[in-house]
Image (cartoon, grey):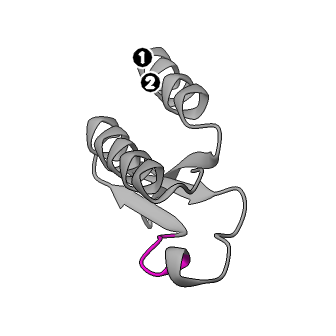
Amino acid sequence: MTSTGKTVFADLAAGFPAWHVRRSRDRRGRDDGWNATRRTKPERGPLSDGVPARITADNPAGLRHVLEQQGAAEAGTGRAA
């Protein structure tokens, strides 16, 4: 990962502390997609329906967008991300 990639990675990790941000690797061991996994399981109940435990995107901007959408959706239900 380049120094720019490390900065982007660190920014994502700092911006979404409820999520563990990481890179996928392809079969050859090269960086592939961007992933975020919840650090804690969603609470059981009606508000947990449709709440993803893992999010995947092709690039860091896409992952940031989906994480922001998830945060806004959870804020609307009163759940913390």
Name above or below for residue 59 compared with residue 54: above
Asked if residue 56 can be seen in this view, the reply is yes
Density class for disc 1 (Cα within 10 Å; few <14, some 14-19, many ≥20) is: few
Name which residue lies at 62% across and 59% down.
Answer: 38
Q: Position of residue 12 (x, y in %)?
A: 49, 31
Judging from the image, what secondary structure is the residue with disc 2 in?
helix
Write the residue at 50% across / 66% down: 54
Residue position for label 1? 4
Q: Is residue 10 magenta?
A: no
Residue at 35% x, 46% y is 63
| Residue 25 image position (x, y, % from top left) | 47, 57
Kind of residue sitting beneath label 1: Thr
Is residue 49 found inside the magenta-colored segment of the image? Answer: yes
Mark 2 to mark 1 CA distance (whole Å): 6 Å
> What residue range appears in magenta?
48-52
> Quick check: 62 left or right of 32?
left
> Which of pointers 2 and 1 indicates the residue nearer the eye?
2
Q: Main secondary structure of the magenta part?
A: loop
Q: Amino acid at mark 2?
A: Val
Check if mark 2's residue and mark 1's residue have beta carbons within 8 Å. yes
| Residue displayed at 58% across by 33% down | 13
Q: Position of residue 74 (x, y in %)?
A: 46, 55
* Residue identified by numbered label 2: 8
54 and 71: which is toward the camera: 71
